[in-house]
Amino acid sequence: MDMRHEALRCAEAGLRVHPLYEVNDALVCQCWKGAGCDERYRGKHPRLSGWQNVASADMQTVARWWDQWPRAGIGVATGRASRVWVLDLDGEEAISWYAEKGKQHGRTPTRGARTGRGRHLWWRWPDDEVEISNGQGQVGPGVDVRGDGGYVVAPPTLHRSGVRYEWLTTGAYVETPQLAPAWLIDLVKKKPKPPAPKIVDIPRRTPWSAKAADEELARRLRLDPYARQRLAEQIGAVVTDQHARKVKCPQCGDTSVWWMIHGTGFAKCSHLNSCGWLGPLTSLLG
C-alpha cells in the first residue's frame, strides 16, 4: 500500500495532513511503547509533537514526511483550516442512530469512510459564522465530532484490528464532502453562552416609616425577574409577579406569610391561626 501517494492525494485536496504511528503486520504500534501502547491510541496517535500547528497541505512537506516514514498512518487535521469536519459513528449503535435520523430528516450523501468499528462522515465546513469543536458522545450514543483542534485517521491507514480504513463512494456516499443538513449542523455547532444574570441589589431591613424603600422593592419585584430570582434565593421564598409565599413569619414562625407585591409593599401573617403580624416587605430581609 503506497501511503505516501495517498497522503499526497489528501494534501492535494487541501487537507492538512500529518503522519501517525502505524501498526506493523503483527498489529503492534511502532511508537516507543511498542506492545505496551494503550489500545485507544495504538496505530493512530501523531508522530509529530504540536501536530495541530505543523499539519500541512504543502506537497513537499508531506512527501518529506512519508519519505522518512513510508508506512506511517495518515492523520488529517479537521476544522476551519482544512475546510472539513467529521462525524465519527463509532460502532453499530451510532450507525443505527444516524440511520434513524436519516429516516426523520432525509438522507444527505457525503464523503464517507469505513473505519475499524464504524463510519466516518466527512462534511464541508459551513460558513464562517459557525463554530464546530470536538466532542464525544454529546449528540448521540457513540457519536463523536471532530472539528477545530481535532483530527481523524484517513484511508488506507491500517487499523489496530487489522482492517484498513477505506473510502466509500457508492450508495449513501459521494466523492467529495458535502454541506451537512441544517438539523445536523444545529446538533454539532457550538452554542452561544447564555447571558450572565444581572446583579440586583435588594434593599435590606429598614424602619416601618421608610415607605419609600418598601415601594421601591415592590416596584423592582414587579418589573425585574432577576430581582425576584435573587430574592427567592435569599429568603427561600416562592416569588411571582404578584406575591411571595412560603415566607417564615418573624413573630410566630409559621411559613404562611404573604408579600403583596402588587401593592405598595407589605407582608402579612395569614394562616388559619395567624398571629396577625403585619410589616413592611423590607422587614423580612436579614
Image (cartoon, rainbow, N blue to C red):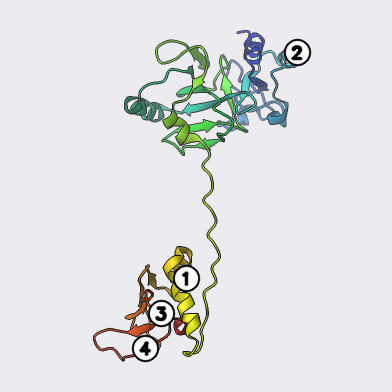
Q: Is residue 116 visible?
A: no
SS at mark 3 in the image? loop
Point out the frontmost of discs 1 and 4: 1
Are discs 1 and 4 less than 8 Å apart at CB?
A: no
Hey, what amino acid is under mark 4? Leu
Q: Quadrant of residue 79?
A: top right
The image position of residue 198, as x and y in percent, is 54, 62
Hey, what amino acid is under mark 2? Gln
Q: Which residue is mark 3?
A: 264
How much space separates mark 2 and mark 3, taking CA atoms?
Answer: 79 Å
Q: Residue at point 24% right, 85% down?
A: 272
Q: Which residue is mark 2?
A: 60
Q: Residues within 10 Å of mark 3 (few under 14, many from 20)?
A: some
Point out the frontmost of discs 2 and 3: 3
Query: Of marks 1 and 4, which one's residue comes earlier in the chain?
Result: 1
Are discs 4 and 2 less than 8 Å apart at CB?
A: no
Q: Which residue is mark 4?
A: 278
